[in-house]
Amino acid sequence: MLRAGPLSDERVVRLANRRFVPFYFDLNNQGYVSDKDARSFVTKVRKELAGGGVPTPPVLFMTPAGEVVGEADNYAGAGKVLAKMKSVLEKNPDYAKPADGEAKDDPDVAFDLDRLDDARRLYEAKGDWYGVGKVARRQKDWEAMEKALAQVKDEKLADDVAMERAHRHWEERDFEKLRDACAKIEEASNRTTEARYYLGLAHYHLKDSAKALETWKAMIAKCSQDPFVYRADWAYCDVRDGGKNQYSSDAKGSSCLGRIGYMGARNPDLRKRKE
Amino acid sequence: MITLIALALAAQDDAAERQKDRTGVAWVVPFTAALEKATKEKRLLMIKPIAFGTSKDGGW
């Protein structure tokens, strides 16, 4: 679930890559991605992870000296994981310094660090209207978003602009407009998986679950794996299985990506938000 | 010598398999490399231990 959830959230991914050294491994030394050095490093301070039948381990934030400075629950939502990441950086400023050669006025860095006001100002200073638009979208400043995106003339960014506008329909819960906007994004687009994921969500919230399932299944079969494919697989299982949170290992291969199922929290995008 | 080459190739395979994760997270593998990077660049390690198995393609 973590992979389809927080680790597929762009804010978490950008901050992880910009300010942390991310690593994952199988605690079982016979596992496909086992790592004895990592196991020794972690179990020295988390002895409960050394035995068999351990509880689902959290994400651990550790110094290179082996001190645990924070953790995020495996089933936490993206917002909580992001907040924890920011909090451990704030409490450990020696590990949060800019990288060598990192420019203070680089809007991409500010964006990655989730400093949206700074990012918007810096994109604007550079005349990067797509950058301004994408930040304004995340700030839900729709007027500024439309104003900025209207100034993007590069045809190569046409799908990016369309997808940013589609996100407005999503946030405003206008599922018919969302459906129509996403359906226009073609398969060859760089935003195709995102568009298909939201197209499925539009169908689902318009009460056509069968069409939602069909959309996600087709997308997962056709597209290379990426965060939206992971999220679509989670949504697919969630809708098909009605939020079931216990799976037998006999069910291996039941998801479109061959997973057993998704335990824990439901895909938050399926929730019906209060207007 | 042959053993060393085989080990190096196996490590490359392992890293390549794990890079098949497509979340967009730039996993640094193996752990010795992650630890070295964290030490050199003074960064915190963000570690996810997996308890319920991993698949051959790096999935979990």
Image: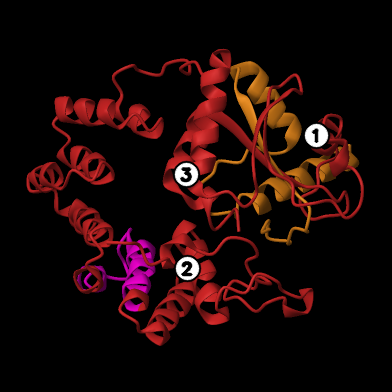
Chain colours: A red, B orange
Q: Residue at x 82, y 31 (%)?
A: A41
Residue displayed at 46% across by 17% down: A98
Q: Which residues are magenta?
A: A180-203
Check chain identity for marks 2 and 1: say if they share one.
yes
Query: What subunit carries mark 2?
Result: A
Which label's residue is closer to the chain start, 2 or 3?
3
Co-location on one chain, circles 2 and 3: yes
**Which mark is nearer the camera, 2 or 3?**
3
Q: Looking at the image, tell me whether mark 1 or mark 3 is earlier in sequence order.
A: 1
Asked if marks 2 and 3 touch (Cβ < 8 Å), the reply is no
- Please tell me how crowded label 2 is: few (under 14), some (14-19), or many (20+) other residues with Cα within 10 Å: many
Marks 2 and 1, Cα distance to the nearest angstrom? 32 Å
Q: Which residue is label 2 attached to?
A: A232
Task: Tell me if residue A230 can be seen.
Answer: yes
Q: State the separation of the CA atoms marked 1 and 3.
A: 25 Å
Residue visible at 48% across and 72% down in the picture: A220
Label ID, residue A79: 3
Earlier in the chain: of badge 2 and badge 1, it is 1
Q: In this figure, which residue is indicated by the disc labeled 1?
A: A42
Which element type, helix, strand or loop, lies under badge 1?
Answer: helix
